[in-house]
Image (cartoon, rainbow, N blue to C red):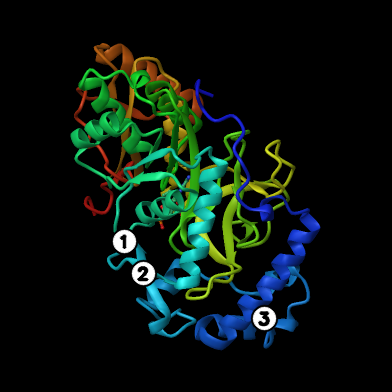
Amino acid sequence: MPPGAPSEPLIWDPAETLPRAELRGLQLERLRTTVERVLRGQALGAERLASAGIAAPDDLHSLADLEQIAFMTKSDLRASYPFGLLAVARDELVRVHASSGTHGKPTVVAYTRGDLDRWTDLMARGMTMAGVQPGMTIHNANGYGLFTGGLGFHQGGERIGATVVPVSGGRTARQIMLLQDLGAEVLVSTPSYSLVIAQALEEAGIDPAQLPLQLGLFGGEAWTEAMRVQIERTLGIAAISFYGLSEMCGPGVASECLAARAGLHVQEDHFLVEVVNPDDGRAVAPGEEGELVFTTLTKEALPLIRYRTGDIGGVIESPCRCGRTTARLTGLRGRRDDMLIVRGVNLYPSQVEHALLGVDGVAPHYRLIVERVGPMDELTLECEPAGGNDHEPLRQRIEAQLKEHTGLRIAVTVLDPGSLPRSEGKAVRVLDRRSVAG
Ligand code: DLL
């Protein structure tokens, strides 16, 4: 932990420390309320419940009964675009957000006043757990707009009583100026954008150690421990992971505590988490990795029962030394859609990131290019040297490291510093040229 970082963050809500049996009871009660809302107001969800023999909230006898219910997916949301899954009347909505879709239309999500209030509170919980305290200044470089990352952290920061600087993403030179002039202790951004800010600080000759920055709250994209080390080293902060998705509320579904930073505490009194085998949809053994599936327990506008996130990770239930009793997400390695199959081997971009950042003299910016060569997918990793390192020896070291970590021979191209596109939000790590080649 960097000097000056708050050592014992408070607990925002006693619900975070409920004994697990009590928590289970509360989840069942709230699940029944959710079932009632869905039966009353969401045709597709009601259909799925009916197929599982659930015609009334009391037909759900235990949390295990949930397993009978068919999953909801992003395709269901797309097919119902924009408001087909609303469980309330349109005039009860006070906000919409959306996640940018790679398939044309975005996924639109909606909030009642109560939803917004609960989301704000969840953000205050997560940010408190991360070490944010009243009176701190938060530089929020997440995009403001349809992306939930901007307004989500904004609301949570204000509720805690911190001062929020709503900078939004981009215009990096101005970010640097405001970080210096307003003296924020907390930086909020995607992990990849924090490194763009770090690079800009370096280019401007500003030593981050001279700034009051202590904490970074990062999320919105998969990032590895190696990336965390890089960020902490270059910015001199403690970097905390926030996880969430628009379909649940946005950020605020799960986040790390500063005290342990060993997994992301799921806000289980609002979201029920399951881990399933992505191929057959069955529950995996406790502690094993699989696809994360969430059920909302308190959402009014857009309740979702058994929503498949596409995200791969695990869940542990052991107590955390921070005192919270909530289960924790571990090993978030990325989305299943991001998994590449190269010569029969499954490969996540995060595995490449991990291997790459283990090589001395490499900058933390990279991109994977996938091409079709004959019947085979071929991968090239594009990266940049840190400082004035020679390209060829670096290229050879990276190739060797990739081979060792992934078992694959991946071609590496070392480009001149600054050649790769920099992201102001979520980084695009994979460039898929397969469809172009036909
Ligand atoms: O990215 C919400 C968010 C904003 C979370 C800012 C945290 C911080 P979407 O745009 O709907 O919502 O994208 C959700 O991003 O399903 C994951 O694949 C990925 N993701 C988000 N946070 C993390 C994280 C927001 N900490 C999708 N680690 C999710 C890994 C993450 N992946």
**Amino acid found under the numbered disc labelled 2:** Val
| Residue placed most toward the observer, 416 or 123 | 123
Instruction: Please report whichever mark, 3 or 2, sits nearer to the chain's N-terminal start.
Output: 3
Residue drawn at point x = 74 percent, y = 54 percent: 18
Instruction: Please report whichever mark, 1 or 2, sits nearer to the chain's N-terminal start.
Output: 2
Indicate the position of residue 78 as horizontal and vertical percent values.
38, 72
Residue drawn at point x = 40 percent, y = 78 percent: 80
Disc 3 to disc 2, how far (Cα)?
Answer: 31 Å
Q: Quadrant of the C terminus?
A: bottom left
Residue drawn at point x = 20 percent, y = 27 percent: 418
Occupied quadrant, residue 69:
bottom right
Q: Secondary structure at mark 3?
A: loop
| Residue linked to disc 2 | 96
Instruction: Please report whichever mark, 3 or 1, sits nearer to the chain's N-terminal start.
Output: 3
Q: Nearer the viewer, mark 3 or mark 2?
A: 2
Dot 3 alpha-carbon crowd within 10 angstroms: few under 14, some 14 to 19, many 20 or more? some
| Residue linked to disc 1 | 146
Dot 2 alpha-carbon crowd within 10 angstroms: few under 14, some 14 to 19, many 20 or more? some
Circles 3 and 2: CB atoms closer than 8 Å: no
Compared with residue 365, is residue 271 higher up or lower down, i.e. above or below?
Answer: below
| Residue linked to disc 3 | 52
Disc 3 to disc 1, how far (Cα)?
Answer: 35 Å
Residue 407 appears in the rendering: no
Compared with residue 43, is residue 392 higher up or lower down, i.e. above or below?
Answer: above
Residue 72 appears in the rendering: yes
